[in-house]
């Protein structure tokens, strides 16, 4: 990231990383800010750990791990932290523990196997202050008529199957001078909804918007609506990853 920024962000897992880094379906970034180290998501497997080693990043320095939502491609890497012999603090919402499905396929996490070596910090507030300049917030409210989670995602409560509205979805905000950096996992509740909520809550312009925007299965008209809406917010830099989709990335690059 530019030397003009005080925050250092390293992408450790993404669908399209180049050699010598390993790529997989998933997302993970390492944040370094004011002497603090934290992870936002952990990808699907141990790829984020292998890439950290390639890049010379010491994950034993990480204090907090934020889980944007509990799909396997964002929280699946947690179990590979056991050999570090450190009880990482994992920040998440209570709803993250619900079993998750995409149609009939289980897409969640076996949380019980992780409880012995991870310290789960369950947050109830809409905004959690991690440090003087780092916050997590969510879920963003639904505000427009063109963004909602895909209807094939479900959770189970007891023996009841319900549509998943991703009530656990967390996003990361980092204060950066007169603006903020906004990092999303998959933006299941809508990237425009998330951006609008972040600007309202933190009352600052967005210098960098990065992460997954979950447009890879969206129709062209929806992609156009989303990108047209994002342009109105006067965001300095938009850096799409993971589930954003080739079509949306192509249009974003063109704009």
Image (spheres, rainbow, N blue to C red):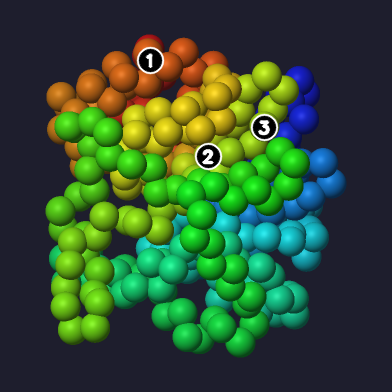
Whichever of callouts 2 and 3 sits on the residue coming sooner in the sequence is 3
Q: Nearer the viewer, residue 204 or 62?
A: 204
Residue 46 percent across, percent down from the top left: 57, 67
Residue 251 percent across, percent down from the top left: 32, 20
Residue 167: name its quadrant.
bottom left
Q: Is residue 47 above or below residue 194?
A: below
Q: Nearer the viewer, residue 159 or 225?
A: 159
| Alpha carbon distance from label 2 to label 1 | 17 Å
Comparing labels 2 and 3, the label whose residue is closer to the camera? 3
Residue 103 percent across, percent down from the top left: 16, 65
Residue 39: name its quadrant.
bottom right
Q: Is residue 21 visible?
A: no
In the rendered image, the residue lying farthest to the right is: 35
Residue 14 percent across, percent down from the top left: 49, 48
- Label 2 close to label 1 by CB (< 8 Å): no
| Alpha carbon distance from label 2 to label 3 | 12 Å
**Would you say 117 lies left or right of 112 here?**
right
**Would you say 98 lies left or right of 104 here?**
right
| Alpha carbon distance from label 1 to label 3 | 21 Å
**Would you say 71 lies left or right of 144 here?**
right
Residue of label 1 = 231
* SS for dot 1: helix
Residue of label 3 = 175
Where residue 84 is drawn, which disc sits there?
Answer: none
Q: Residues within 10 Å of mark 1 (few under 14, many from 20)?
A: few
* SS for dot 2: strand
- Label 1 close to label 3 by CB (< 8 Å): no
Q: Is residue 130 visible?
A: yes
């Amino acid at each position: 990231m530019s030397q003009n920024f005080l925050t250092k962000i390293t992408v450790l897992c993404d669908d399209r990383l180049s050699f010598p880094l390993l790529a997989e379906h998933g997302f993970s970034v390492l944040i370094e800010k004011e002497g603090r180290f934290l992870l936002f998501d952990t990808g699907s497997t141990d790829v984020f750990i292998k890439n950290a080693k390639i890049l010379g990043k010491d994950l034993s320095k990480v204090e907090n791990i934020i889980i944007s939502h509990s799909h396997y491609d964002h929280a699946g890497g947690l179990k590979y932290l056991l050999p570090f012999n450190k009880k990482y603090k994992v920040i998440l919402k209570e709803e993250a523990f619900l079993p998750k499905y995409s149609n009939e396929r289980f897409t969640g996490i076996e949380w019980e196997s992780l409880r012995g070596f991870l310290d789960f910090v369950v947050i109830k507030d809409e905004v959690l202050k991690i440090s003087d300049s780092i916050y997590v917030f969510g879920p963003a409210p639904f505000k427009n008529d063109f963004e909602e989670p895909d209807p094939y995602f479900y959770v189970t409560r007891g023996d009841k199957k319900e549509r998943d509205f991703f009530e656990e979805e967390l996003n990361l905000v980092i204060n950066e001078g007169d603006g903020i950096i906004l990092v999303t996992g998959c933006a299941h509740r809508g990237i425009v909804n998330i951006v609008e909520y972040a600007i309202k809550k933190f009352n600052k312009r967005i210098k960098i918007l990065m992460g997954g925007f979950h447009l890879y299965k969206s129709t062209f008209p929806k992609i156009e609506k989303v990108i047209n809406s994002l342009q109105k917010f006067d965001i300095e830099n938009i850096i799409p990853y993971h589930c954003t989709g080739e079509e949306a990335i192509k249009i974003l690059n063109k704009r």
